[in-house]
């Protein structure tokens, strides 16, 4: 009998189903607040002005289609390091870096790299991005979960992370999101990061800092990288996975990087060559186009400035949508407390709506959120905020 026939049918990510239901829905009022993609005020995809300009420059200087470099395009890696670690730390020679297939690829390479170094025991605050657990298990790691979020305060469960850091065995890996937590929008404060870093150091924990929305919390990429730089300053060894899907809007081009901080510089070449050897077995070369576009932005002071403004403008719009949602729900006197919509950061509002309420949002109002109540704030604009809030109001009454 065929071995292929013995394969089991795997369930797709629930968001895929939501997206196809949305596509089929004929309602002129339908609202998509499901998948985590930034959308412009007009509801369409957003082309970053700095990226539009970089694409023109690239087209005028066509580099052709040859293979690039197995570690990654040097100018891209240099810019990626500066974005995450800042000018100074990026150039101290303590980083081993690899261009990856976006943030997901960066995480995959981080898991392989950590496995190669002997780390297989992971801790993850939940709820979290749905892919981490399966990705760790896919490469033979083990995940223990703790609470990231408290339903009563609608904020991070700090006691839980502290208690877990205090009790986890040495050499455990903790996966943290640096900002704009997916799906809760609940981030650690600088004080909380300081405490986390202290414990990490004391207890020989390896942090994996996942950075998928750098800039969308404060509007300033530098500020949003605070935790990365703080960990570096303390002499901690850690890994960073970095995605430019969101903060350059390069989703489908798959632009990302992974960095390992090796405190003893003498060993950086070993870590670097390990990364390249691992990547050769996975992909050989990461895709060039998006990384070239990003490199042009990274290398041009003018485009850097445009990029900073783009990110600041996006964040401003997200904050203004949040404010308007709160105002509308307050005006409607919708039962419940809703101020977490303005407290949470980035693309996501963790609404607290139940799966049944979310089902009704879809069936009665054509409002497509996620079953866990994660609302992509960027799917809202002046054209549909009231419609959306009225629908939320109806389903909670
Ligand atoms: N980490 C987090 C927290 C995310 O939310 C995402 C994407 N939604 C990723 C990593 C991966 O992003 P990508 O592979 O699209 O760059």
Image (cartoon, grey):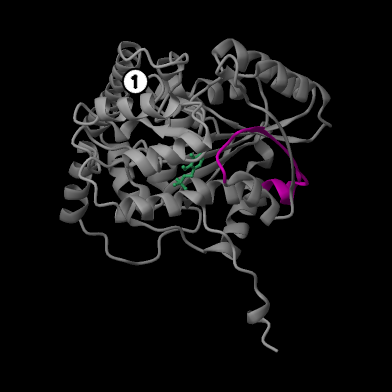
Q: Residue furthest bottom?
A: 1
Percent coordinates x, y for residue 127 in the rendering: 60, 33
Q: Quadrant of the C terminus?
A: top left
Task: Tell me which residue sits at (47%, 34%) in the image.
Answer: 357
**Which of the 4 image quadrants contains residue 339?**
top left
Q: Residues within 10 Å of mark 1 (few under 14, many from 20)?
A: many
At x 63% / y 80%, what residue is drawn? 4
Residue at (64% x, 81% y) in the render:
5
Helix, strand or loop for disc 1: helix
Judging depth in this view, the residue of 371 and 189 nearest the camera is 371
The residue pinned by badge 1 equals: 322
Report x, y in % for residue 241.
54, 40
Residue 245 x %, y %: 39, 43
Residue 110 is covered by the magenta coloring: no
Please determine whether, in this image, residue 135 is positioned above or below residue 234. below
Please say if 6 is above or below 165: below
On-image quarter of the N terminus: bottom right
The stretch of residues the image draws in magenta is 113-130
In this orientation, does residue 82 appear? no
């Amino acid at each position: 009998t065929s071995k292929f026939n013995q394969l089991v049918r795997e369930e797709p990510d629930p968001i895929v189903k939501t997206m196809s239901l949305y596509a089929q829905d004929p309602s002129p009022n339908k609202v998509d607040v499901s998948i985590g993609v930034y959308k412009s005020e007009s509801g369409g995809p957003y082309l970053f002005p700095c990226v539009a300009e970089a694409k023109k420059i690239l087209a005028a200087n066509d580099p052709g289609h040859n293979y690039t470099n197995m570690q990654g395009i040097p100018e891209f890696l240099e810019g990626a390091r500066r974005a995450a670690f800042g000018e100074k730390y990026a150039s101290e020679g303590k980083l081993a870096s690899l261009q990856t297939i976006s943030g997901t690829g960066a995480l995959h390479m981080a898991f392989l790299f950590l496995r190669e170094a002997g780390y297989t025991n992971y801790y993850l605050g939940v709820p979290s991005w749905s892919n981490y657990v399966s990705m760790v298990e896919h490469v033979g790691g083990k995940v223990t979960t703790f609470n990231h979020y408290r339903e009563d305060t609608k904020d991070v469960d700090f006691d839980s992370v502290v208690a877990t850091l205090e009790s986890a065995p040495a050499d455990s890996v903790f996966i943290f999101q640096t900002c704009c937590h997916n799906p809760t929008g609940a981030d650690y404060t600088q004080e909380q990061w300081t405490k986390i870093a202290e414990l990490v150091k004391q207890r020989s924990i390896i942090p994996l800092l996942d950075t998928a929305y750098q800039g969308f919390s404060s509007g300033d990429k530098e500020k949003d990288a605070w935790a990365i730089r703080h960990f570096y300053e303390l002499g901690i060894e850690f890994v960073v996975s970095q995605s430019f899907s969101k903060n350059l809007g390069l989703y489908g081009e798959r632009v990302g990087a992974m960095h390992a901080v090796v405190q003893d510089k003498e060993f950086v070449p070993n870590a670097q060559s390990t990364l390249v050897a691992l990547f050769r077995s996975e992909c050989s070369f990461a895709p060039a186009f998006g990384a070239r576009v990003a490199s042009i932005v990274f290398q041009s002071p003018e485009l850097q400035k445009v990029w900073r403004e783009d990110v600041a403008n996006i964040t401003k719009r997200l904050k203004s949508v949040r404010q308007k949602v709160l105002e509308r729900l307050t005006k409607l006197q919708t039962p419940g407390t809703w101020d977490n919509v303005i407290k949470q950061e980035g693309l996501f509002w963790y609404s607290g709506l139940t799966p049944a309420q979310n089902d009704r949002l879809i069936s009665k109002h054509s409002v497509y959120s996620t079953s866990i109540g994660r609302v992509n704030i960027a799917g809202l604009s002046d054209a549909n905020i009231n419609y959306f809030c009225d629908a939320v109001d109806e389903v909670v009454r």
